[in-house]
Amino acid sequence: LQAWQHHLALTLLASWFVAETRLDWRKHYPTDPTLVQEYDRDDIRMDRLPQLSVANIRELLRATLPLPQLSLDEAATLVVSHLDNRTRSRRSRLKNQRSP
């Protein structure tokens, strides 16, 4: 139950972040009417451009957030930690599959 509540809380926060980012984007970057006309065709009537997608927002975050700079030792420690966690997880999963 607690894991579900954590998942739900993070999902709500992420959705809120996406909604706020869309609103801020629309406020700070108004739609260029010539761009709307460029996409307006006879078969599809567009009076405005679509909202930012989650993928668009992810790309904005990737472009603006700084990447962590790890030393060689820090990177090696991180890789070993991931391998250790993956091995423990695999062992646990295999153990649970063998148990009746």
Image (tube, grey):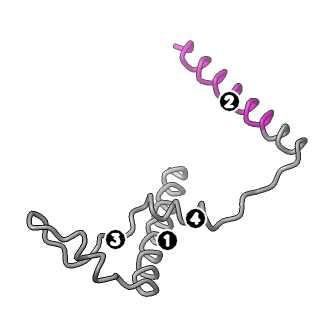
Q: Give the vertical position of 96 relative to 71 (above or below).
A: above
Q: CA distance from mark 4 to mark 3?
A: 16 Å
Q: Quadrant of residue 81?
A: top right
Q: Earlier in the sequence, mark 2 or mark 1?
A: 1
Identify the disc placed on residue 17. 1
Labels 3, 1: front one: 3
Q: Earlier in the sequence, mark 1 or mark 4?
A: 1
Q: Which one is in front, 53 or 2?
A: 53
Labels 2, 4: front one: 4
Identify the disc placed on residue 61. 4
| Residue tagged 2 | 86
Q: Residue at x 14, y 67 (%)?
A: 41
Q: Amino acid at mark 4?
A: Leu
Q: Are marks 3 and 1 in contact (CB under 8 Å)?
A: no
What x and y, as percent, mark residue 61?
57, 64
Q: Earlier in the sequence, mark 4 or mark 3?
A: 3
Q: Are marks 4 and 3 in contact (CB under 8 Å)?
A: no
Q: Residue at x 46, y 72 (%)?
A: 16
Labels 1, 4: front one: 4
Q: In this picture, which residue range is highlighted in magenta?
A: 79-100
Q: Residue at x 40, y 82 (%)?
A: 26
User: Under tag 3, what secondary structure?
Assistant: loop
